Amino acid sequence: MTLKFNPFTNKLDITGTSGSGSGDVSGPGSSTDNAIVRWDGTSGTLIQNSVATLSDTGDILANSIDLTVPVDETDGGTGQSAYTTGDILYASGVNTLTVLPIGSATQVLTVTGGLPSWQPSSGGGGGVTSVNGTAGRITSTGGATPVIDIDAAYVGQASITTLGTISTGTWNGSTIDVAHGGTGRTTLTNHGVLVGAAAGAITQLATGSAGQVLQSAGAAADPTYSTATYPSTTTISQILYSSSNNVVAGLATANRAVLTTNSTGVPVLTALTDGQIIIGSTAGAPAAASLTAGSNITITPGSNTITIAATGGGASPLTTKGDIFTFSTVDARLPVGANGTILTADSTATTGNKWTTATFPSTATGTGKVLIADGTNWVASTPTFPNASATSGKFIQSDGTNWVASTPTLPTTAGAAGKILRSDGTNYVESTPTYPNSATSTGTILRADGTNWVASTATYPNTATTGDLIYGSASNTYSNLSIPTNTGVPLSYNGTNVVWYDPTKVSYYHDDFITGNNLSLLGWNSSTSGTGAAVNLNNTTNFTSGKIGLINMLTGTDTTGRAGVITDATNFVLDSAIDYMDLMFSGKVSALSDGTDTYTLRLGYGETNGAAAVDGMYFEYTNGVNSGNWQIVTASNSTRTTNNTSTAATTNWTVYRIKATSTSINFYIDGSEVANSPISTNIPTGTSRTFGFKFEIVKSAGTTQRVFSLDWVSHYKKLV
């Protein structure tokens, strides 16, 4: 095969076929990715990496490529291996390049016979032999190498003069720039403003809207039109103001007026007459008003004046030494107070003032005493208080006789929010952790979050009795569980929370079906119908690995085959003596019900097999109802309430739960309450509505056997 370098693609083109040979070839233990393999030595058996690489896309990378044969024209080369200074490369034929050596001095390149060639300038090359000028315009020295110049006598033509001002004609030359007295622009917008741009072309501002004004933006930017609009005319003494956003309008002037704003902030000029003043109002705009004279008062308005004078006045109401002249609705007398009382303001008193009931000492006694109430009057304190400033941070504390400056200090400034004061062994300092500034819900406590003290989310009881247990009674709620009345009572779980087990009020039943093959010994009764239908206890044929004991209910092969188990129909009753009952059980079905092999499952409380319960509470499933999702049912004397759930039946082991009271039945699957639970209607209550446990599978189509396996049953009943 042949490798040729293609300069257009920068890759090697491969042609021909590979050779053949034999022998063992060895190489290095590792290699460089994309390195081109080469022979190491002349033995022909050892290869090695090369510096050159060949990428996956065919690109070759090497320091240089030394070809022994020039790349020909059809492969992107020239077919040449050497050049001389001045050589010219030209196509002498199809796909053939030829070198034309440089010609001699004064020769010119011409075409001869369809190919380029060097020829003498006066020969077949067609060179210029003489150039003549035009008198008064262009001069020429003539000959083969003439010198061309403008005639010194040239005086111009009709289109331009040689010197001076262009006074006629139309300018059709290039745009005149700023440096030569122009604008540098070719078009101007009607009514646009021109703005200088240093030596660059003059810029033009967009025209503003009616009423906008041109505003300077400083030395570093072009002026701009204001967003606000202004009136085109004003009247004498008119004040401009913003009448709305970005709209400046004129405020009509008024003689002898003051400027205020109305209740919405709009400026208003309010004219005043003699003696008027501006009166404010929280309900509206300030207004011009005149003062109104009261009793025994005259008010005389004038130009820039208001004269207020008293016009009457009777005899003084004072009668006794120490009386005080005061006023209620008229001049009034406040009698002198008792010795030691002081005058205080009291808005409920007739004159607005009154003497205190408590008395105050008339003289100061021992140094350092302060005033203190004795329950009736103010008297000098028994202990003394410091009169001089102490060290920064000290506070006042009792020494058993008097109040003195403390030994420890307190911080002089408040710390970060939430800090408290604590002793460092010498003084009181602010704590490192913070504490809540307000109490949250009743019963929360302080707990460390690793940095600060915070209020707990959970609440705790405020009191406790000897022997109480603290337990989580609800989410984020801890409560007291009082000790039981009876000794030796164990703690148990009632399905909702922990309780003390009370054998007088609680019964608990659990069956794991591990006592052999006799159902009746466990209190269960089986019921079957159809060929091959059976109920097996711990039967190895249908035993599931990992389950301790099972009751397997087999439908057999009849289209209406069935199998089920039930306890005594009078086991349970929901009456006023029952607080609640809680049934839990685990089971699975061998295959789901379908259109070919159809069956119905009923699991929970009931009193008969082979049909829907007369009295009971149970789960029910078949493929043709509720899209194959479980239903929940209550029945009282054959009147039923049936609710659809959104929980699909599966072939997995599933835990079911029914919690019953006389007013509400709750249904759960795998720990979650199902949709449309609880049911509060058609609950079998009263002594005549009795039931037991009921589990059954009933075929209605198909001959393939189906099996329901019951792993365990637990039941908890609590009396009121």
Image (cartoon, rainbow, N blue to C red):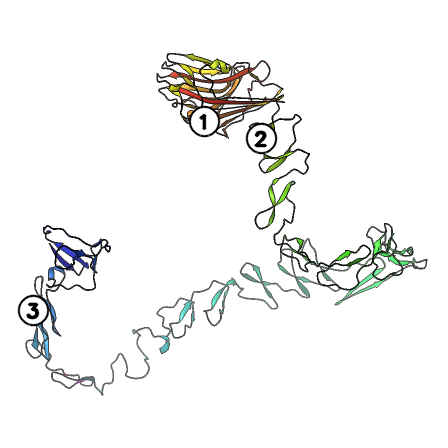
Q: Secondary structure at mark 1?
A: strand
Dominant SS type (magenta): loop
Confirm whether the magenta stretch covers residue 140: yes
In-front residue for pair 634/391: 391
Of marks 3 and 1, which one's residue comes earlier in the chain? Answer: 3
Q: For the residues marked 1 and 2, what is the alpha-carbon distance in whole angstroms?
A: 22 Å
In-front residue for pair 487/573: 487
Discs 1, 2 touching: Cβ within 8 Å: no
Q: Secondary structure at mark 3?
A: strand
Q: Which residues are magenta?
A: 130-146
Q: Tell me the residue that label 3 is attached to.
A: 115
Whether residue 546 is visible here, answered yes or no, is yes
Q: Residues within 10 Å of mark 2 (few under 14, many from 20)?
A: few
From this viewpoint, which residue is outermost toward the right?
Answer: 320
In-front residue for pair 652/688: 652
Q: Tell me the residue that label 2 is attached to.
A: 497
Q: Residues within 10 Å of mark 3 (few under 14, many from 20)?
A: few
Q: For the residues marked 3 and 2, what is the alpha-carbon distance in whole angstroms?
A: 111 Å
Q: Amino acid at mark 2?
A: Asn
Query: Which label is found at residue 654?
Result: 1
Residue located at (62% from left, 56% from top): 416
Of marks 1 and 2, which one's residue comes earlier in the chain? Answer: 2
Locate residue 333 relative to residue 6 in the image: left or right.
right
Rendered view: 685 above or below 323: above
